[in-house]
Image (tube, rainbow, N blue to C red):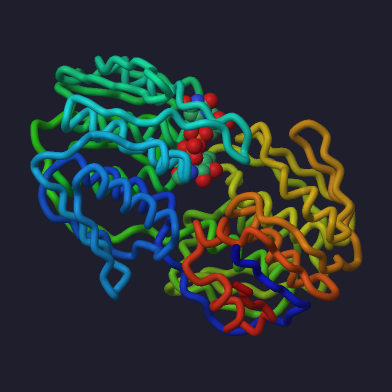
Amino acid sequence: MSRLIVRPSGPLSGEVVIGGAKNSALKLMAATLLAPGRYVLRNVPDIADVDTMSQLLEAIGCSVRRREDDALEIERPQRVTPEAPYELVEQMRASTAVLGPLLASEGRASVAKPGGDNFGDRPIDMHLRSLEQLGATFELSHGVIEGRADGLVGRPQVLEYPSVGATENLLMAAVLASGTTTIENAACEPEIADLAAFLNRMGAHVLGAGSPTITIEGVETLHPVEHVTIPDRIEVATYLSAVGVAGGEVTLRGARSDHLEILIERMGHMGLRISPEADGLWVRGPERPRATDLVTLPYPGLATDHLPLLVAVLSIADGTSFATENVFANRFRYVGELGRMGANIRVDGHHLVIDGVDRLEGAPVQAVDIRAGAALVVAGLGADGETVIHDAHHVDRGYASLVEQLARLGADISRDT
Ligand code: UD1
């Protein structure tokens, strides 16, 4: 298992290039199941989760080829096997995104039921209920969700919570349903708007994606297209946090400030100077970060994926910070790892009280998920001695070149395989 080794670093300087958004690319890949033909997805990050989704599409019958230029070519044949096996769903929950497109295009989908993960119990009840509203039926048999749909029919829907995954599955099913579907309380994440733009290019009629009310006028057929994935806003938060800890001046090429308003505002409070540039963001780190309060919420609120990174910065801030995690019930496993590095963080239910310490100490720590691993990298930049991050394969699920790009900015980071 590979490990990352991080030593005290900074000030950082130079430029990084932000890749395509993992959470968008995976759904765009699933959406290619909606119509046969050859798709080109550009700006798809070269990460393990994209490999897993490629394997899933191949298991279903598609062929997937990565080109040199960060594009994926996907050929979706006329006939596919609409099954998502346990081995792949267990590796990556986003595999459940094939449910909506397979039901809509094949009238049938077998998807292994996802279990819990490091964020705690992660049900897909909302995905299933909203697809049932369009006429699909589901049975659980030996751990596999067997879905059937004999012609989906558009319907008004109100989501009880703006779930990203449920909104996406519903959207991908409703584009081929007969009649009109409205989704109230839809998730508003930029990745939803990206998916809708892709679907519209394929010939779908989706209005309002990116807002809480989405209207989908079903169409009979869709066709393959080319599309460019939006930049990854979590990768942006990762480099901003690195500068928050290590200091310096960095340009993040390709970052979109319009997707990051709350993050930029909160990091401003923490003492970072961030300003938009023609094709990205410029950031300057503070002498020492300042304490601030954070609350995660569905978009446009602060993203739950941003919190571990920001907590790493606040662990060395001047003063006491309060942070509340509202999206996932059990997403604090990284806090104990920061504690091993000397961070003074108290967990109280879904709240954190972070008493900033002057300096962290390098220690052996474990990456429990993608962002937890990245948060430990960020913390390691500001820790005395050596931080050894075990289970670095989690980090590789979401970052194509974190080690290389940080090293290029002057960070002392390497991989030990
Ligand atoms: C997606 C992102 C993830 C991000 C999250 C929230 C991908 C691959 N992952 O995850 O990185 O952190 O959005 O922005 O795109 N819930 C239910 N029942 C459901 C669905 C969700 O109870 O059927 C709950 C979840 O347990 C969680 C909350 O709703 O508490 C939010 O989940 P959701 O927005 O669906 O997140 P994901 O789509 O799983």
Q: Is residue 386 left or right of residue 187?
A: right
The correct choice, above or below, for 172 with respect to 355 in the image is: above
Write down the quadrant of residue 102 in the picture: top left
Does residue 108 show up?
A: yes
Location of residue 317 by image quarter: bottom right
Q: Residue at x 44, y 26 (%)?
A: 185
Instruction: State left or right for residue 27 relative to residue 360.
Output: left
Residue 293 position within the rendered picture, expressed as x and y whole percent measured from the top left: 77, 47
Count of labels in the image: 0
Residue depicted at 9% across the width and 36% down the height: 221
Image coords of residue 213 (percent x, y):
37, 30
User: Looking at the picture, how far across and down is residue 324, in whole percent?
Assistant: 73, 39
Which residue is pictured at 56% across the width and 60% down the height?
393
- From the viewer's perspective, is residue 144 above or below residue 408? above
Camera sees residue 299: no
Q: Nearer the viewer, residue 35 or 13?
A: 35
Question: On the rendered structure, is 77 left or right of 164?
Answer: left
Which residue is found at the position 86% from the left and 65% from the top? 360
Q: What quarter of the picture does the C terminus occupy? A: bottom right
Location of the N terminus (image quadrant): bottom right
The image shows residue 73 at horizontal and vertical percentages of 21, 61
User: Of residues 238 and 95, which is closer to you in this image?
Assistant: 95
